[in-house]
Image: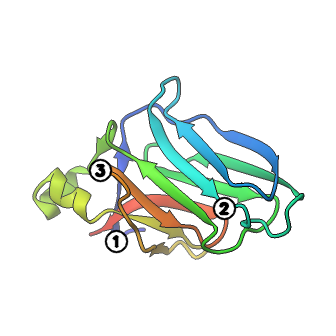
């Protein structure tokens, strides 16, 4: 964590979200900045994400304060590559002041952003990240856990 610049947000955080559904069909969970209709993140689960269809699954999502990050918990494990997260940061993008110094501009910082998975030992694994749209970063999720948007220092 100490060797990363985390993408900060100046917007209101999304509300904690909990939903229950039956596995076997694709699901999309959209988190909005609190009190606004501006997307913060999208979580997608493929139809086969939770194995056999017909199982009841509970998904709990909690935003991490002040950054583009969240904690994801599920009542059943999901298959790696069958779930993905897309962070949408166009409206409330806030580069840390030190990141501006290191990268020279907000645009240069933005170009190296990636989705990171916070590991149990406090380390962060930067995941293969794509950009499905401007101001969006997306990665397949290996397991439930904590995820954030960051760039190397």
Circle 2: element type? loop
The relative height of residue 68 versus residue 12 in the rendered view (above or below) is below
Mark nearer the viewer, 1 or 2: 2
**Residue placed at 56% from the left, 61% from the top?**
84
Q: CA distance from mark 3 to mark 2?
A: 23 Å
**Residue placed at 58% from the left, 68% from the top?**
141
> Horizontal and vertical percent for residue 116?
46, 67
Q: Which mark is residue 46?
A: 2
> Horizontal and vertical percent for residue 21?
81, 47
Q: Nearer the viewer, residue 22 or 32?
A: 22
Mark nearer the viewer, 1 or 3: 3
Residue 65 in view here: no
Around disc 3, counting alpha carbons within 10 Å, would you say few (fewer than 14), some (14 to 19), or many (20 or more)?
A: few
> Horizontal and vertical percent for residue 102?
15, 64
**Residue placed at 89% from the left, 59% from the top?**
55
Residue extending furthest toward the top: 35
Q: How is the image coloured?
A: rainbow
Can you say which quadrant of the picture contains the N terminus?
A: bottom left
* Earlier sequence position, callout 3 versus callout 2: 2
> Which residue position is annotated with label 1?
3
The relative height of residue 31 versus residue 48 in the rendered view (above or below) is above
Q: CA distance from mark 1 to mark 3?
A: 25 Å
**Residue placed at 57% from the left, 41% from the top?**
30
* Earlier sequence position, callout 1 versus callout 2: 1
> Horizontal and vertical percent for residue 108?
16, 60
> Which residue position is annotated with label 3?
134
Mark nearer the viewer, 3 or 2: 2
């Amino acid at each position: 964590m100490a060797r990363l610049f985390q993408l900060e947000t100046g917007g209101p955080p999304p509300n904690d979200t909990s939903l229950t559904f039956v596995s076997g069909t694709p699901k999309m969970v959209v988190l909005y900045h609190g009190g606004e209709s501006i997307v913060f993140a999208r979580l997608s689960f493929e139809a086969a994400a939770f194995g056999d269809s017909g199982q009841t699954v509970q998904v709990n999502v909690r935003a991490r304060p002040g950054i583009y990050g969240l904690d994801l918990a599920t009542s059943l494990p999901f298959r790696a590559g069958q779930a993905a997260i897309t962070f949408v940061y166009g409206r409330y993008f806030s580069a840390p002041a030190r990141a501006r110094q290191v990268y020279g501009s907000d645009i240069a910082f933005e170009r190296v952003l990636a989705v990171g998975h916070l590991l149990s030992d406090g380390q962060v694994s930067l995941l293969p990240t794509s950009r499905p749209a401007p101001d969006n970063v997306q990665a397949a999720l290996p397991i439930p856990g904590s995820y954030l948007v960051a760039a190397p220092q």
